[in-house]
Image (tube, helix red, strand yellow):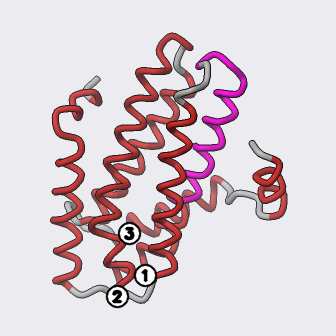
Amino acid sequence: MSILDQAIAAITPPESEQDRREATAKAEALARPGDWLSQILGHHREIEAQFERLRTAAPSERMAEQKRLGLLLTAHSIAEEVSVYPALAADHQVGHAELAYQEQSAAKMEMGLLERLDPSSQDYHDKLEHIRGAVLHHIYSEEGTWYPKLIESAGPADQDRATSRYAEEYARYMGQDSQLFTR
């Protein structure tokens, strides 16, 4: 973690596990089966689980688990960027949409940097934890405030559009690689 990252973390500590659970519960209470929010919540849980698999994998297995995480993060982010972030912007949450996009771009770059590190090194572990913390904070922001506001204020046509576009883009990106997640 860079000195700047350490300073920011000291000034603005991450939310607690309890805060995250409450944000997730809030979003889950608003989601309907099959809607864009329920799809995203499911993918958020998959992302969290994949981080855990990567964190606990033997060094010889980390690259395969990292590939799975990268695929999942990228499919999820592209689907959100195409379907939900435009809905956020249309709902007068342009700042949230822009921030979310920037955070996801940064996560993709950091995942690329992680690939360059020795999976058995402390640098790898530190970089992975930095990425995990950033992604968990991103999820917290979406589930705690941004998406609940959107689900409550967007009209039925916007909700339906976000649902169909999210599913379409996620499936398009995952393609045949979705078989990586069958265990």
Image position of 33 (left or right of 27): left
Above or below residue 151? Residue 61 is: above
Residue 138 percent location from the top left of the image: 53, 59
Q: Mark 3 highlights which residue?
A: 29
Give the spatial CA distance, label 2 vs label 1.
6 Å
At x 52% / y 49%, what residue is drawn? 107
State which region is magenta. Answer: 119-138
Give the spatial CA distance, label 3 vs label 2.
15 Å
Above or below residue 65? Residue 12 is: below
Q: Mark 1 highlights which residue?
A: 149
Q: Secondary structure of the magenta portion, mostly?
A: helix
* Secondary structure of the residue carrying numbered label 1: helix
At x 17% / y 48%, what residue is drawn? 172
* Secondary structure of the residue carrying numbered label 3: helix
**Which amino acid type is shown beneath numbered disc 2?**
Ser
The answer to which of 40 and 101 lies nearer the viewer is: 101
**Which amino acid type is shown beneath numbered disc 3?**
Ala
- Does residue 68 belong to the magenta stretch? no
The answer to which of 60 and 37 lies nearer the viewer is: 60
Query: Could you tell me if the residues under marks 2 and 1 are in contact, i.e. CB atoms within 8 Å?
Result: yes
Please state, as top left, top right, bottom left or bottom right, where the N terminus lies in the image.
top right
Q: Mark 2 highlights which residue?
A: 153
* Secondary structure of the residue carrying numbered label 2: helix
Q: How many marks?
A: 3
